[in-house]
Amino acid sequence: MPHHKSCKKRLITSRARNERNRQNRAMMRTKVKQYRANIGEAAAEDKPKSLSEMYSLIDTQARKGLLPKRRAARLKSRLAAAAAK
């Protein structure tokens, strides 16, 4: 256990951030899985809109630091390729 006041605060804030990051990462993974599962049966006019929403979600998570920028780019590329099939 930390002894200094600042270290105690750091422990509390890091736990809170860890929990928030875990929830955001789980939410993103769930939405990506749902998108991949539903891409085949989605209508042609809905695909660009849903792909744009996924791009926005992934970019937001990358900006927050939940996943590296290159991994975000790779994920967006793979989702676009899946939508094009």
Image (spheres, rainbow, N blue to C red):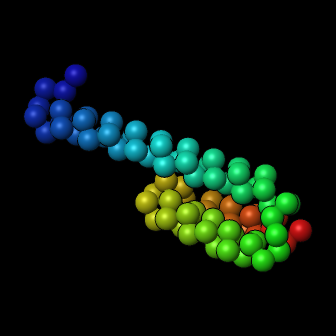
Q: Is residue 65 visible?
A: yes
Q: Is residue 70 visible?
A: no
> Residue placed at 63% from the left, 65% from the top?
54
Residue 34 located left or right of residue 59: right
**Hey, which quadrant is residue 32 in on the image?**
bottom right
Question: Residue 51: where, in percent of width, then height?
Answer: 69, 70
Q: Residue furthest top?
A: 1
> Residue placed at 26% from the left, 41% from the top?
13
Question: Residue 37: where, in percent of width, then height?
Answer: 79, 52
Residue 82 located left or right of residue 19: right
> Residue placed at 82% from the left, 74% from the top?
44
Q: Height in image: 26 above or below 84?
A: above
Residue 56 located left or right of residue 9: right
Q: Height in image: 26 above or below 85?
A: above
Residue 34 located left or right of residue 61: right
> Residue placed at 81% from the left, 64% from the top?
42
Question: Residue 21: where, in percent of width, then height?
Answer: 44, 46
Query: Which is more toward the observer, 38 or 10?
Result: 38
Q: How many marks?
A: 0
**Hey, which quadrant is residue 55 in on the image?**
bottom right
Query: Which is more toward the observer, 33 or 5?
Result: 33
Q: Height in image: 66 above or below 20?
A: below
Q: Height in image: 14 above or below 57?
A: above
Q: Residue furthest right?
A: 85
Quadrant of the image containing the C terminus: bottom right
Question: Residue 1: where, in percent of width, then height?
Answer: 22, 22
